[in-house]
Image (tube, rainbow, N blue to C red):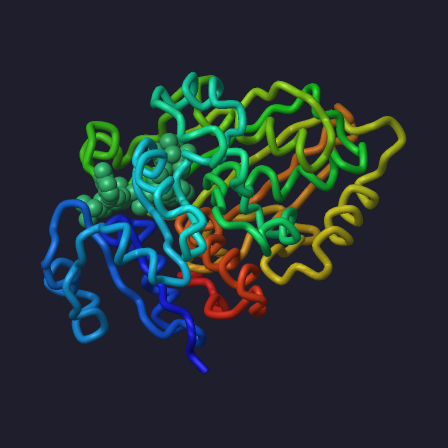
Amino acid sequence: MKELKVGIIGATGYGGLELIRFLHNHPEVEKLDLFTSSDEGAIFSSKFGHLLSIHDTALKKIDTETLSNFDVVFTSTPSGVTSKLLPPLVGVGPKLIDLSGDYRIKDLSEYEKWYKKDPAPEEIVNMSVYGLTEWNAKNIKNAKIIANPGCYPTAVLLSILPLIKERLIDPQFLIIDAKSGVSGAGNKPSQTTHYSEMNENFSIYKMNEHQHIPEIEQAIAMFADAKTTITFNTHLVPMTRGILATSYAPVTPGVTEEQLYNCLKETYKNHPFVRVVENVNSLGTNRVKGSNFCDICIKLDERTNRATIVGVIDNLVKGAAGQAIQNMNVQFNLPETMGLDVVPLFI
Ligand SMILES: NC(=O)C1=CN([C@@H]2O[C@H](COP(=O)(O)OP(=O)(O)OC[C@H]3O[C@@H](n4cnc5c(N)ncnc54)[C@H](OP(=O)(O)O)[C@@H]3O)[C@@H](O)[C@H]2O)C=CC1
Ligand SMILES: CC(=O)N[C@@H](CCC(=O)OP(=O)(O)O)C(=O)O
């Protein structure tokens, strides 16, 4: 029986469109209403022709009273929006799942420093639960508000947390080199995402200043009980979707490649969306495109005694909308894979 009434704020953005793509076929979703801050009354399929006959409904005005009647409200808006938008909705009815960075960082001064925005109210940040599903399902189950992880942190954390937690690698010397497709920057055009400047170009950006640094460090402390400062850099690849994050870390003396691999394999044996891949010399974003998978591989460089750990995701799915729906499934005691069981678009 279909039961859930779901609202999406930010439905016209890339994350919002992906929420629609998966929620449309979700067996438990009875009603799906779309909200806008800029185009109230517009017929959704007239803005996005690919949804003709699928979503011919009008965009609704964001309004607390209306939204309080929903079971779940997803917010997929730029940072700095939900810090103000969500407080009146906390505890009044719907479960809130926020895809932005506004509720992820517990230390408000760190949020201000990295996001350069005013933080959300402290008591709501304190009650928010970090939605890295594979690592936090117990808390996600009862959460009123979920801070869905950032795209880069999802790829990075899933691939390194087990190894840090088991003390197989040393997080003090962790270097993370990550690359993303352009959809990670959202639908608002900018100089860096302009076709003629992005195409045939491969660039580094936000050098040592990326806002996901405190999020990754916080999660390493939270889930692997280790305090560290990481080197983390991000690159823009001239493609639409996908993140590939490569982490380098010294291996605890005596630890073998087999132990590293087995640790990852054991951690995720009951987690269908994380696939630990054996004997792979080439791992690319194509193998997860359009899907909620995170594929991971690891190799030990015996010359340097450093491990190379690679995680790939689709930034818009496991890195955003897919993981958000996975969290909704956990909150409503549904199978984690419900509505998300799709085959990647390999070609
Ligand atoms: N793109 C990605 O890969 C990922 C993005 N994220 C995060 O998810 C969030 C959404 O990202 P993405 O979909 O890419 O962003 P987009 O820029 O593509 O879309 C954001 C949407 O938010 C709505 N919006 C803008 N301003 C406001 C406002 N003041 N109040 C309410 N709604 C507003 C707009 O819709 P309208 O004008 O109709 O209101 C817009 O379409 C961001 O915080 C992003 O950092 C997280 C992980 C991955
Ligand atoms: C390619 C690209 O520009 N990606 C974005 C990802 C944004 C994101 O997810 O940021 P939040 O922390 O606000 O959610 C970036 O690097 O900033």
Residue 184 visible, this angle: no
Horizontal relation, residue 269 to residue 183: left or right: right
Q: In the image shown, does 279 or 275 lie closer to the viewer? A: 275
Q: In the image shown, does 154 or 84 lie closer to the viewer? A: 84
| Image location of residue 46, percent across then percent down | 10, 63
| Image location of residue 19, percent across then percent down | 36, 58
Residue 117 visible, this angle: yes
* Residue at the outermost right position: 254
Q: Quadrant of residue 185?
A: top left
* Residue at the outermost bottom position: 1
Which residue corresponds to the image point at 89% horizontal and 31% vertical from the top-left? 254
Which residue corresponds to the image point at 21% horizontal and 69% vertical from the top-left? 55
Q: In the image shown, does 304 or 67 lie closer to the viewer? A: 67
Horizontal relation, residue 183 to residue 211: left or right: left
Q: Quadrant of residue 5?
A: bottom left
Which residue corresponds to the image point at 48% horizontal and 47% vertical from the top-left? 145
Horizontal relation, residue 131 to residue 169: left or right: left
Asked if residue 94 is positioned above or below residue 176 in the image, the reply reads below
| Image location of residue 202, percent across then percent down | 35, 30
Q: Quadrant of the C terminus?
A: bottom left
Q: Quadrant of ligand 2?
A: top left
- How many numbered marks, from 0 up? 0
Asked if residue 107 is positioned above or below residue 294 in the image, the reply reads above
| Image location of residue 144, percent across then percent down | 50, 50
